[in-house]
Amino acid sequence: MSNSSLVDLQSVTSTSLRTEVPVEALRHEAPSTGMTNAMEARHGDPIPMYGDTNARGFKTVEDLTVADCVIAHLEAEEVDAVFGIPGGNLAPFQQALRKHASMRFIISSHEAGAAFMADGYARATGKLGVCMVTAGPGATNALTGVASAHLDGVPMLAISGNVATDRVGLMAMQESSSTHGVNTVEMFRQACASSTGVADPQSFQRLLARALRTAQGLPGGAAHLSVPSNIARQPIHRASVPTTRGAFRARPATAPFEDLRAAFTLLRTARRPLIFLGSGAREAMAQHGEVFTAFVTQHGIPVATSMRGKGLFSEREALSLGVLGLAGSKRAEAYLRDGVDVMVVLGSRLGEWASKSFHRYFQAVHHVIQVDVNASNIGQFLPVRLPIVADVGSVVTGLAELGQMIGPSSGARVQERWSQVMALKEPALTVRAPQDRDSIKPQDLMTELDKHLSPDMDLYIDMGNCTGWTAHVLHVTPPARIFYPCGLSSMGWSCGAVIGGKIGRPERAAVAVVGDGAFLMNGTEMLTASRYRVGTVTIVLNDNFLGMVNHGEHVQDRTQPLEDDFYSLGNPDLKAFAESLGARAYTVNGPGQLDALLPEVLRRADESGQPQVIVAHIDYREVPPYGDRFAAVASDAT
């Protein structure tokens, strides 16, 4: 960078952030000399996702059936597992899958479980998740799982069968059309990014390509195709099939240099900056995590994450504040409460989970810089000073390069930032002895699990009290990963997602944490894991209540005791339930037991392929860390 350009930049960064400097003043032209070749290349050309564009080939295949055309596209995307339940109207796809030894058709216990498995597979692998179900109830059962994936931006292709076109309007069994039965095309249209009915084989390939581009687009999400059984068997006279992965994946735009300069200027001169990572930063952090860590360390910038972004930045790093949001870290909350002048939001929509129920502390932030590939996510909750619609990775690397070229505003400023973070103390967990002799406090249970998190572990966390306890207590460090289905917040998600994730990444330990109520909803998928020898580990928090709603209502109405049977589950024997489905099951009912048991359970899951279930009896009286959520619900009710 030329000396004159550096002087220009420094003259801007010396301006007080409390003075309303127009963003355009910060976005002055990039210097014409002195910029690194890497910077010039990155800001002039899109980032290639899967090699050179010219390498993305297609081949023409004569008389390929519609069903085989789908399989060929999935093979090109390196998808090696499809999840679903067979049915008469799905038969052509089942028969096509049987012919392809490279792709397994994993038959679940319920269609929602199949969609949850496809979701977990996509999260674990970064590939397309695929769910195939039959018409009518097969499609309606899958809807929740497809919607859950879509709201979390998980790329999924859902294919449902339908009756043959010559039977439409005759009230054929499981007809799913606009005239009879449930119109599944319209139903899915309300729950995912696109939903299309296929009318003939020759137009099918265009519709399939559109669905694949939509699912793997920006933002990602779920796409649905309804395919009549006779159409699925018919040939496409000249089918064009991709030969390389990524043919239908969109390339995100890179951040303009002037926006990077403006963002860096604001960060560089801030007294109390904060970088907030959402799940949209997952790919960027996987590729550029070391660069990001070096940047925030050099400049003394603390980092918080949303719940879905948990663990993208090591929660053992000194600058990590942990989760900021519902059930989040007290350090993160305290830092935000005491004032933030510049907050850079990377890949978060700042929804209710991330914003701590839209807390007023967020609204006091003076300057917000929000980066997202989806323009509609920007500014939903907070006024945004500098919106950047671009790939998060390009912002991370761009800021890091500017940081290397220019450096912090002063050593004293960096030291002050470090001192502010180091002064924050996470209060010790207040854990009293359980009133029931044969139970353990959920905080103790999570502390014991925390000791056994390993780099090769993926955690799949369900919705309920377990969500709050894991977010609040666990410390996740990459390459360990943790996944939450916060978009739809569907109970029972982890029961399927952990299986799909383990199938997609068999070399990684796959651990689900789920409440007993959610386990009763979808725990039958243990049978799927048992049949296909998928060595998962599921930890069930067993308190015999629908705990989150029980505590939430207790906050609103103290006249109803927690012991009231209204939200009780009836005390089922979950160990026997799991064993009946082919899992090996264990009981934990006191401190220290999970700590002693878990290494052996993980080893057995890996070596035997048999699913393992740990039923942990927790104290139902312990209030989960959802104070702001409970207060918000109580406020809405009055």
Image (cartoon, rainbow, N blue to C red):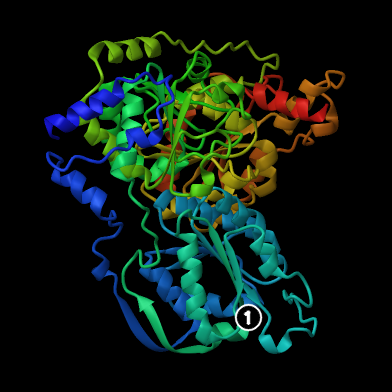
Q: Position of residue 549 (x, y in %)?
A: 74, 31
Label 1: few (<14), some (14–19) or many (≥20) C-alpha neighbours in 10 Å:
many
Residue underneath mark 1 = 228
Q: Residue furthest right?
A: 559
Residue 436 left/right relative to 229: right
Name the residue located 48 percent from the left edge and 13 percent from the top edge. 426
Q: Nearer the viewer, residue 560 or 272?
A: 272
The answer to whether residue 587 of the structure is visible from this angle is no
Q: Is residue 98 above or below residue 553?
A: below
The image quarter containing residue 282 is top left
Q: Nearer the viewer, residue 269 or 55?
A: 269
Name the residue located 52 percent from the left edge and 19 percent from the top edge. 333
* Mark 1 secondary-structure assignment: strand
Q: Is residue 79 above or below residue 238?
A: above
In the rendered image, the quadrant that contains the C terminus is top right
The answer to whether residue 426 of the structure is visible from this angle is yes
Residue 366 left/right relative to 566: left
In the rendered image, the quadrant that contains the N terminus is top left
Q: Position of residue 484 (x, y in %)?
A: 54, 40
Name the residue located 65 percent from the left edge and 63 percent from the top edge. 188
Q: Position of residue 262 (x, y in %)?
A: 34, 34
Q: How many numbered dots are placed on residues in this image? A: 1
Residue 8 left/right relative to 75: left
User: Mark 1 is on which residue type?
Assistant: Pro
Q: Is residue 412 above or below residue 438?
A: above
Q: Nearer the viewer, residue 420 or 152?
A: 420
Q: Position of residue 196 (x, y in %)?
A: 60, 72
The image quarter containing residue 436 is top right
